[in-house]
Image (cartoon, rainbow, N blue to C red):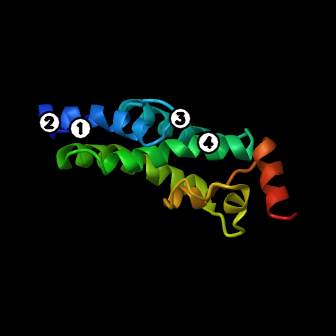
Amino acid sequence: MTSVLRLGPEDNFSLQEAGRVLYAQGWPEVHTVRNMLAQWEWLVAQVERGYTATLSEYLDDLSCREWLSRAGLLVTEPARTLLDQALQPLDTRFQAATEDDGSGALARHGHAGQGDGWWWKRVPRRLIGRLATDLARFRGR
C-alpha cells in the first residue's frame, strides 16, 4: 500500500491489530491487511481471466474482500484512507469483470451470514469450468 499519506505508529498498530481482532471474532486465521489485499488482487485477476474453481471455492475466495471491509472498520482514519485507496482500483476491476447475480444463485448456495457487501452479489461475466457448471445448477438451468 503506497501513498503520499504518512502513517504514524498508531495507524500502523491499528493495521496490525485488525487481524488479531478479526481472529478473535471468529476468522480462522490471523491475517494481515497486506496479505488480504494480495489475495483480493489475485482473485480479481482470476475472475478477469476466467475463474475455473467451484462455486464453494469462489465464495471462500470472496471472503478476503469481506475481511478487508471489516478490517477497515477497525483501523484509524488515515489507515482506512490508505486501505480505501488500495481497494478502489481492485474493486473497479472486479466490478468490470463481474455482473450482478440477479438469479440469487450465490445466496442460495449459502453465503448468507458472511456479510452484506456488494461483492457477495457478483458473479464473473466469463463463466468457465466448474464455476459455470455450479452456477447453472444453482440457477436451475
Tell me how far mark 2 sits from mark 1, CA to CA.
6 Å
- Dots 3 and 2: beta carbons under 8 Å? no
The disc, 3 or 2, on the residue closer to the chain's N-terminal end is: 2
| Residue shown at the point (31%, 51%) measured from the top left | 73
Q: Position of residue 91 (x, y in %)?
A: 45, 51
Q: What's the amino acid at mark 3?
A: Trp
Residue 49 occupies quadrant:
top right
The numbered dot on residue 60 is: 4
Q: Position of residue 66 (x, y in %)?
A: 47, 49
What residue would you read off at disc 2? Answer: 10
| Residue shown at the point (80%, 63%) measured from the top left | 139
Q: What's the amino acid at mark 1?
A: Ser
For label 3, count other residues whose C-alpha is less than 10 Å away and answer few (under 14), some (14-19) or many (20+): some
Tell me how far mark 4 sits from mark 2, CA to CA.
31 Å
Q: What's the amino acid at mark 4?
A: Asp
Instruction: Let me know if residue 7 appears in the view.
Output: no
State the SS at label 1.
Answer: helix
Judged left or right of residue 128, residue 59 is left
- Dots 3 and 4: beta carbons under 8 Å? no
What residue would you read off at disc 1? Answer: 14
Tell me how far mark 1 sits from mark 4, CA to CA.
25 Å
Instruction: Let me know if residue 123 appears in the view.
Output: yes
The numbered dot on residue 42 is: 3
| Residue shown at the point (29%, 34%) measured from the top left | 17
Q: Position of residue 94 (x, y in %)?
A: 52, 51
Q: What's the amino acid at mark 2?
A: Glu
Q: Is residue 36 above or below residue 96?
A: above
